[in-house]
Image (cartoon, rainbow, N blue to C red):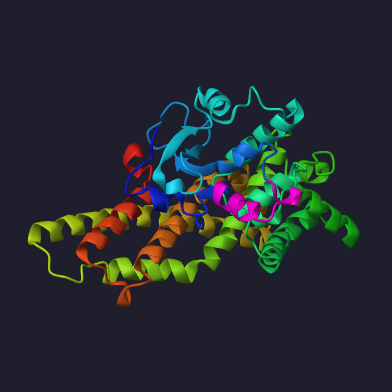
Amino acid sequence: MALNDRYLKPMLDAGSSRVFNCNDIWRKHARKPSEAAQFFTNPRLHSLVLIKETNVKGARGVSPKGQIVGTKLYFPYNGDDVYEGGRSVFLHHPQAMSVLREQFGLASTPLTQEQLLRDLKILRILDQLPSLDGFLMRNALEQENITVHESYFEIPDDERAAIVQYIRRKLEPLVQAAFGSESAAASKVSQLIDKLWEARDKEALAPLIEAFRFPDHEALTIFGSWNRITYYTFEYARAKERRESFARWLRDDALPRNYVAEKHFEHIGGMLKETVRRLRWHWSAVEDISRKYETLYARFLSERDGVADFITFLRGSRELYWRMGDSLSKINHAIHCWDLNTAGFPGRRLPSDQLGHILGVLRTVLVSEERAAS
């Protein structure tokens, strides 16, 4: 399928947490080749661009049951200019493996089966994330003992350290609560926090699973989802200023700076109204989950009755994590597109044709499930 239209560039731009432009990053590395700089074992896979897309119409093969977001694999016709168009397929489409074999010659590659399986495993791991934030991708791959060059994640060490510290601070009270009135050694608490952060060693986490009565077969999923909700609350708070600047522009400055006919003005006004409606829907979704999380977490720390409510919240954390990740990444993507398209204009006031274009892009990026659900 060709994606050759005026919305292609903002949909493929790196800088959005909905897009992982492996092609762009790999080509930067190719100028100074290094074994450590490889993401996939099969070099031909480096031309891929991964795009997260919401399954708003229940289309077959977009995403697995229980996930509202699917992973689209985009294969550019010209790796030097991905915006010329290309072919795409959802990872869960029945023909996805056929497309991969055809596109990258998997049937004739000299790579070993182990190497091929590693690349397919990377795609499956990234498919389990609702967004392609560098921090989440790096953490998910590290938990599966897959190491790739850190440049692919484009996250400074100090920023990563701040996120890790924030999440660990949220985890510590949960671990201490599992011991009740017992006096646990600091080293034991720290060890359990590490295991909770990794969310893959069920045996080591047995005290927490038992203390909070999580279903044994769901416990690791619950812990992993909670970690990621915590990450998204961090991102939500950190992006507050940019989000509010974007909202003020939509309210005050998303008007053409030149004269336009009344009919065209009404058309732009309709697009603006729909863009605001979609932004409000996603913003409310993230705000509601974030507020509920912070409220229940505070009660968990201060009130005996708050423990049960917070545990109930955690049991539903997987669904909330997907919703929060999808909506927050769409807001961030919209802000990214808005910033790129308006930064060069005084007061960010655009001519009518460019204003109509960016509103069309924003409306597309902020597509929601609201209409389908209603």
As drawn, 230 above or below 145: below
Residue at image x 26%, y 61%? 354
* Quarter occupied by residue 358: bottom left
Q: Give the residue drawn at x 63%, y 35%.
A: 124
Q: Observer-nearest residue: 146 or 181?
A: 146
Looking at the image, residue 27 sits to the left or right of residue 374; the answer is: right
Looking at the image, which residue is at 50% across and 23% down? Answer: 95
Residue at 55% x, 41% y: name it.
48
Principal secondary structure, stretch drawn in magenta: helix
Figure label count: 0
Chain part drawn in magenta: 23-38
Between 73 and 132, the residue placed more toward the observer is 73
The image quarter in which residue 183 lies:
bottom right
Is residue 181 toward the left or the right of residue 106 in the image? right
Across and down, in percent, residue 190 comes to: 84, 58
**127 relative position to 356: left or right:** right
**Does the image show residue 247?**
yes
Q: Which image quarter is the N terminus in?
A: top left
Give how far across and how far down residue 125 sits, in percent: 65, 39
Residue 189, percent across and down?
84, 57
**Residue most extreme to the front:** 31
| Residue 31 within the segment the image draws in magenta | yes
Where 253 sits versus 215, above or below? Answer: below
- Residue 131 or residue 16, whichever sits in front: 16
**The C terminus: image quadrant:** top left
Residue at the limit of the structure toward the bottom, as seen here: 346
- How far from the left and from the top, in percent, is residue 370? 35, 44
| Residue 230 appearing in the image | no
